[in-house]
Image (cartoon, rainbow, N blue to C red):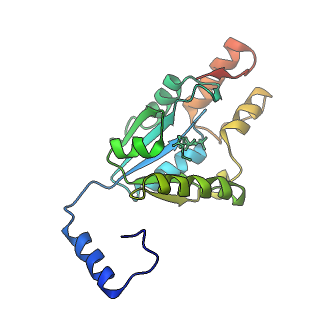
Amino acid sequence: MLTKHSFSDNDLCNLLREERSVPWMENRAVYPGFFDPITNGHVDIILRGLRIFDKIIIAVLKNPKKRALFSTKDRVMIIQQIFAQEPRIEVKAFDGLLVDFARKNKANIVMRGLRAVSDFEYEFQMALMNRKLNPEIETLYMMPSVNYSFLSSRLVKEVFMLGGCVKDLVPKIVEKKLKEKLTKRRSFFPINA
Ligand code: PNS
């Protein structure tokens, strides 16, 4: 019914009746991304999400076409370690359509962060495409702390590789993994996930 353009009083009554007849369900959200690597900006959004949702499934895109520094397995493992003490978080790798992943995992909310106006166009297109693919799934946006509004995985990798400090920008385990990568490879030439 939410796909209708206007609602009569009758529609609204029916919507409220439907709402009341739905038995209590766990309020689940999917938080999708590439997370190469996860940054404090992502963590900020996840922590905000935990105030709203009973459960968050962090969906790590495994995309062989997109070049990644960390393998899918590593990206999942890093996030699992960060949230090891939080039973309401699950981390899974996914491919294919996000809406299909959300449906399989019984989540009807997709949670995303919006850092700046520059994010808007891409996010707007993605949210509407996902709604077209599955109108039952809503996308919900949250703003991270201003401390992270400039932050991206790409910039973290670049700054770290050029000798800059990323201490306040990523969780400790990410800094450690970046150091290990750089020691092994001397440079961050991207690899395929
Ligand atoms: O971290 P990112 O790169 O901003 O994450 C993008 C992501 C993973 C959310 C997006 O690429 C995605 O949902 N990919 C899955 C494929 C899909 O469902 N595409 C159609 C929706 S636009």
Q: Quadrant of residue 165?
A: top right
At 49% from the left edge and 56% from the top edge, which residue is drawn?
132
| In the image: residue 17, left or right of residue 126 | left
Residue 41 x %, y %: 60, 47
Query: As rendered, which of 95 and 161 lies closer to the eye?
Result: 95
Residue 75 x %, y %: 53, 29
Q: Quadrant of ligand 1?
A: top right
Quarter of the image where the C terminus is located: top right
Residue 97 x %, y %: 48, 40
Image: 6 above or below 53: below
Image: 171 above or below 47: above
For residue 88, say whether it is visible: no
Q: How many marks?
A: 0
Q: Quadrant of residue 19?
A: bottom left
Question: Which residue occupies the extreme top position in the image?
Answer: 184
Question: Which residue occupies the extreme bottom position in the image?
Answer: 9
For residue 9, say whether it is visible: yes
| In the image: residue 156, left or right of residue 125 | right
Quarter of the image where the N terminus is located: bottom left
Query: As rendered, which of 40 and 32 lies closer to the eye?
Result: 32
Residue 4 x %, y %: 42, 73
| In the image: residue 122, left or right of residue 78 | right
At 52% from the left edge and 26% from the top edge, which residue is drawn?
72
Image: 159 above or below 5: above
